[in-house]
Image (tube, rainbow, N blue to C red):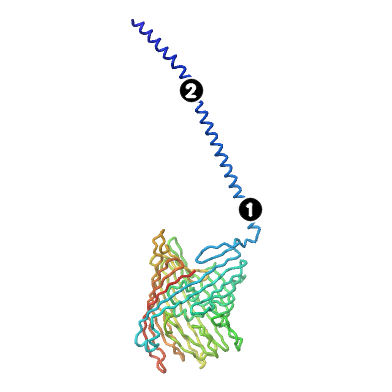
Amino acid sequence: MRRKKSWHGLVAVGAIALMVAPAMANEPSEKEAQLEQRITELEAQLEKVVTQIQTNTTSQTTLESRIAELQTSAADGDGNDMGMYWKNGIRFDSANKQFKFKLGGRIMNDYAFFDASSNAENYYGKDEFRTGSEFRRARLYMAGTIYGNIGFKAQYEFAGGDADFKDVYITAATPFGTLTAGHHKEPFGLEYLTSSKYITFMERSLAAQMAPKRNTGVSLADGFGDGQWRWSAGVFRDSDTFGDDTNNLGGSEWNFTGRVSGVAWRSQNEDQESLLNVGVSGSYRKGSDELVDPAFKAPLNDGFGRVALAGAQRIGPTFVDTGRFGTDDEMKMWGADMAFLMGPLHAQGEYVMQDWDVSTGSSADVDAWAAQIGYFLTGETRAFDTKTANWNRTSPTSNYGDSEGDGLGAWEAAVRYDTADLNDGSLQGGEITQWTFGLNWYLNPNTRIMWNYVMAEMSNLPTGTRFDARADVDIFEMRFQIDF
């Protein structure tokens, strides 16, 4: 029985094998067909991708070829196509950099509030100390370079209701330095040569107010000592607010002015830059039938001079004034200055003396000096340009409202002491001493809000035959400034 059952089992297994064999034989054939179909579809898709890549490559090659053609065309042409961009002002440069232009200007809107002593009100007049506001400066200019070596600047002042000349000149690069011809600043001192856009306080110091102002003439300037030192010298005519000096009886009305300055010490590491810049200036001024007021640029005819200093404010009275006095049409001026920088700390000092030949046959010396120190509470460093030997634009670490930074702008605190003595010999203009405390908020490199508190003390003021008058004035000032 066991053998029969075994035989029956073998027969059953064989039957099952015969039934499954055809199915197993057909299964690989169907899978192969499906695979072949799938491969065909993938090959078609791959062919489309290859075609698309080839098309894109052709377009890119065409674009690159077109760019190369335009570059070749620009190189073969004059390259004078202009491009506009912003760099602290609106600028236009040609492709070959032979032509560069800049449009710029500045607006300075001032406010002043006074607290004058009774002596000051009696001496200057009570109406002189009324709260007021003015546009201290409202300027527009265009400057540039043409043909790579000829420069120009035409800047006009609209504050006060007319269009006075400021910088209106032409420059040329020469083997001996940069030649400047036209109405521009005489090369004297540090603070006056620093633009009003970059000075620490709202008004320049008493020493800087005694320096020569802009006049019409020709000057030459160049660097030496690996560019760390600079000399500049020029000859000028005393001119009016439009740069003119005409209808003179004599031909000897010339001013000779020069300055030498440079970096006496410098140190720089990864964290901060430190330097000490020093300078000396001199001016010999000769006039035959008129001598211009060095403070106000008002022509004084027939050999008369005048020294007048407004103080740390422009709204309000002139605090010390010699009035008109007779001269022998000759005056010499000397000056020394220094600038110090160490990270967020900066300082400067300046001294100016005027030596007048008075018509009485004697000489009279009037002088002024100033010292100041400032510190950036937010860590910035005040910029000093060694090529021009004066202060330059300060840029905040982060601009006001900048979402990528803290958005505070830059904050600077400063204090200045300055004094002037206009009493010597027959000249009696008075003495003045000032303390000025300043707080500046740089919203961005082109916008600034300034607050100044001034304590001014005048003494030995002329009152007829007596020179013992005294006056005290406290002033709070504020300025809204933008420049570009």
At numbered mark 2, what does the secondary structure look like: helix, strand or loop? helix
Q: Which mark is residue 129?
A: none
Q: In the current view of this chain or complex, which residue is farthest to the right?
A: 76
Q: Point out residue 332 in the picture as x, y percentages from the top left corner.
A: 52, 84
Residue in the picture at 66% in, 58% down: 76
Q: Point out residue 138 in the picture as x, y percentages from the top left corner.
A: 49, 75
Residue in the picture at 56% in, 87% down: 287
Above or below: residue 378 compared with residue 372? above
Tell me the crowding category of disc 1: few under 14, some 14 to 19, or many 20 or more residues within 10 angstroms, Cα based. Answer: few
Q: How many marks?
A: 2
- Taking the image as shown, residue 253 lies to the left or right of residue 438, namely right
Q: In the current view of this chain or complex, which residue is farthest to the top?
A: 1
Label 2 and label 1: CA atoms lie apart by 61 Å
Q: Which mark is residue 69?
A: 1
Front one among 375 and 240:
240
Above or below: residue 78 compared with residue 237? above
Above or below: residue 95 compared with residue 251? above
Mark 2 or mark 1, whichever is nearer to me: 2
Which residue type does callout 1 highlight? Answer: Glu
Q: Point out residue 268 in the picture as x, y percentages from the top left corner.
A: 46, 63
Tell me the crowding category of disc 2: few under 14, some 14 to 19, or many 20 or more residues within 10 angstroms, Cα based. Answer: few
| Quadrant in the rendering for residue 17 | top left
Q: Are marks 2 and 1 in contact (CB under 8 Å)?
A: no
Q: Point out residue 366 in the picture as x, y percentages from the top left corner.
A: 46, 85
| Quadrant in the rendering for residue 234 | bottom right
Which label's residue is closer to the chain start, 2 or 1?
Answer: 2
Q: In the current view of this chain or complex, which residue is farthest to the left?
A: 1
At numbered mark 1, what does the secondary structure look like: helix, strand or loop? helix
Q: Which residue is mark 2?
A: 28
Which residue type does callout 2 highlight? Answer: Pro
Quadrant containing the N terminus in the rendered view: top left
